[in-house]
Image: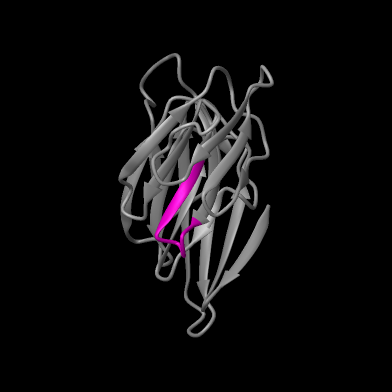
Amino acid sequence: MFDVTYNKYVISFNDIKSLNDISSAPQILSFGFPGSPHFKPGQIIKIETQNVENQITKELIVVAYGMPSSFNERSFLCLQDSFICTLGEFVIKLSYTLDTLYWWKGFIGACFALYGIQNLQFFILHNELSIIKMDMNGKILWEFAGRDIFLLPINIEEDAIFVIDDLNNKYKIDVINGKNILD
């Protein structure tokens, strides 16, 4: 799908269409309810990281059961020693060496995009049903739900987030407290 270079790492994200397309993988990480007959893999991503200094490559298959979402350049956020990414209804934080899962969170609705704010102290998660401010440790600081599904794109300024829902309702959300300034 695409590659990202950050510090000494090249990170590759590749879509996998089916669990049958996985021939071998040293590690598979699954989120959701794989035993439920109502859930099937919504999204499968192969993540590879290569340390360009020592040429060590690591590989991880991540399977997110439930609702799918598209994986694109807004689906991940690079930090100093780790990265955060969205997969279907989940947000996860992994080390670049892919050997540490720092945290994961599940949400109702697809997770569309991540936006780093305030010098990467926090990030905004654009979820299908809500806009969420989180810290880098996975703590939810506030969550704002509108009247319907939030559309892409959203516009983030220093003190406010501008977003429109599917019913054409407009919101201006305060970055600090998560309240709609337009109310």
Q: How is the image coloured?
A: one colour
The answer to whether residue 179 is left or right of residue 4 is: left
Judge whether 97 appears above or below 60 on screen. Answer: below
- Quadrant of residue 12 within the rendered picture: bottom right
Q: How many discs mark residues in the rendered view? A: 0
Would residue 160 be counted in the magenta stretch?
no
Measuring from the top left, give residue 155's x and y in whole percent: 64, 44
Residue range highlighted in magenta: 117-125
The residue lying furthest to the bottom in this view is 53
Judge whether 57 appears above or below 183 on screen. Answer: below
In front of the other: 121 or 182: 182
Residue name at image x 46 percent, y 51 percent: 123
Q: Is residue 29 visible?
A: yes
Measuring from the top left, give residue 15's x and y in whole percent: 62, 45
Measuring from the top left, give residue 134's x and y in whole percent: 38, 46
Would residue 118 be counted in the magenta stretch?
yes
The answer to whether residue 94 is left or right of residue 171 is: left
Residue name at image x 45 percent, y 62 percent: 120
Residue name at image x 66 percent, y 20 percent: 166
Q: Is residue 23 visible?
A: no
In front of the other: 52 or 158: 158
In front of the other: 64 or 154: 154
Measuring from the top left, give residue 68's x and y in whole percent: 56, 30
The residue lying furthest to the top in this view is 38
Judge whether 76 appears above or below 41 on screen. Answer: below
